[in-house]
Image: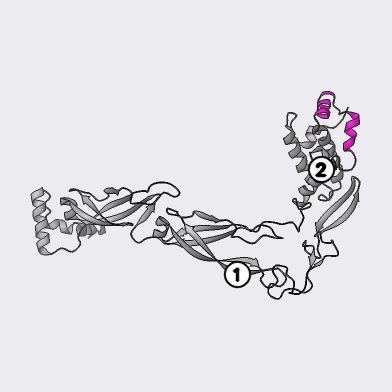
Amino acid sequence: MSDKDYYKILGVDRDASSEEIRKAYRKLARKYHPDVNKSPDAEQKFKEVNQAYEVLRDPQKKANYDRFGTADPGAAGQGTGGFGGFGDAGAGDFGFGDIFDMFFGGGGRRNPNAPRQGADLEYRLTVDFKDAVFGREMDISIPRTETCDHCHGSGAKPGTQPETCSTCRGTGQAETVQNTPFGRIVNKRVCQDCGGRGKIIKDKCSQCNGTGREKKRRKIHINIPPGIDEGKQLRISGEGEPGINGGPPGDLYITIKIKPHEFFKREGDDITCELPITFVQAALGDEVVVPTLQGRAKVKIPAGTQTGSEFRLRGKGVPRLYGRGEGDQRIRIKVVTPTRLTEDQKKALREFGRLSGDYISEQSSNFFDKMKRAFSGD
């Protein structure tokens, strides 16, 4: 019978799923691996973690352990030597490639000379208010990295060619072999001589200094769809940075910013505006002409309209992005109080006040002056 609690070693419950056991093992294997943890007891703990996982990952061994406190002797011993299953790639669980990926970010098995997609780019574009509403086709110029025209991307001086790195023999990776108590480990690192490219450039291109790339501005034709809003992005496929080692280019993402309009505002798919009218228009009613994004339109103001009243013009708003129909234009009324009145106008208003029962005495005109003196103690 085993004197070790494998569940406790891995820090999982007895009813833990196989995925939970696997995750716990990977975490502890990363923590105690001798190449990572230099503590005196790291190797022993790593061995215990490995033994625990070898038992609990196998349904038959796990069942025997849960029932009898030990795994099948013939099978349990497989995990005590070497990497305890790390080399058993055929088991489909955790081969040597997995442990290399775990410690070196997956880069161990990646060919540095393999084609890779280029990086995506973001471009912030400011457009006029009306262009965002109705859409527009336009050309933009973006800065990006492109293949050097002088060396055609080789990085070498025209007439010369890059040479295969003698250290890594063109693989871009240098191997080191280490013998440990658990077996022989082959570690792969990016070749320091060629930087992982597998090639050495002795005569560098004078235009790109051996990088094979150069900064340029590229003109791109784009189509801004009607109804686009602030912060939306347009994706232009294949217009990002060029690919590496013949890989496909990245994409270009255009983030939209919209200039404010002096009269209109946008609220979703609706356009709003404030319309000032006179006291007479508000009291007696009127028909007024208001601007819209499509031109002018007439709006009937009923008698007795108050400040804050809202009128709606159907279909005069923003086209729905990639949809059907348009929003509305909402007109908010603001009754303007006159600030400069002639004597005749004042007389007419006083007469109006008298007729409506709202006559204001001459003393009321000094009301705020009286309040001011009262609070000041005069």
Please tell me the numbered disc located at residue 95: 2
For marks 1 and 2, the one nearer the N-term is 2
Image spot of residue 317 (x, y percent): 35, 51
Image spot of residue 236 (x, y percent): 55, 57
Please tell me the numbered disc located at residue 216: 1
Mark-to-mark CA distance, 1 and 2: 45 Å
Majority secondary structure of magenta residues: helix
Which of the two discs, 1 and 2, sits closer to the camera? 1
- SS under mark 2: loop
Point 74% across, 39% down: residue? 23
Q: Check residue 66 for magenta coloring.
A: yes
Image spot of residue 162 (x, y percent): 78, 69
Point 10% across, 56% down: residue? 350
Please tell me the numbered disc located at residue 157: none
Residue 137 is at least partly visible in this image: yes
The quarter of the picture where the C terminus appears is bottom left
Image spot of residue 25 (x, y percent): 77, 39
Question: Which stretch did the figure color magenta?
Answer: 57-82
Name, please, the residue furthest toward the front: 159
The quarter of the picture where the N terminus appears is top right
Inspect the image, locate mark 1, and give the three-letter code of the amino acid beneath it: Lys
Residue nearer the viewer, 207 or 21: 207
Q: Quadrant of residue 347?
A: bottom left
Give the total of numbered labels: 2
Residue nearer the viewer, 45 or 189: 189
Inspect the image, locate mark 2, and give the three-letter code of the amino acid beneath it: Gly
Point 73% across, 35% down: residue? 19
Point 9% across, 58% down: residue? 348
- SS under mark 1: strand
Residue nearer the viewer, 184 or 135: 135
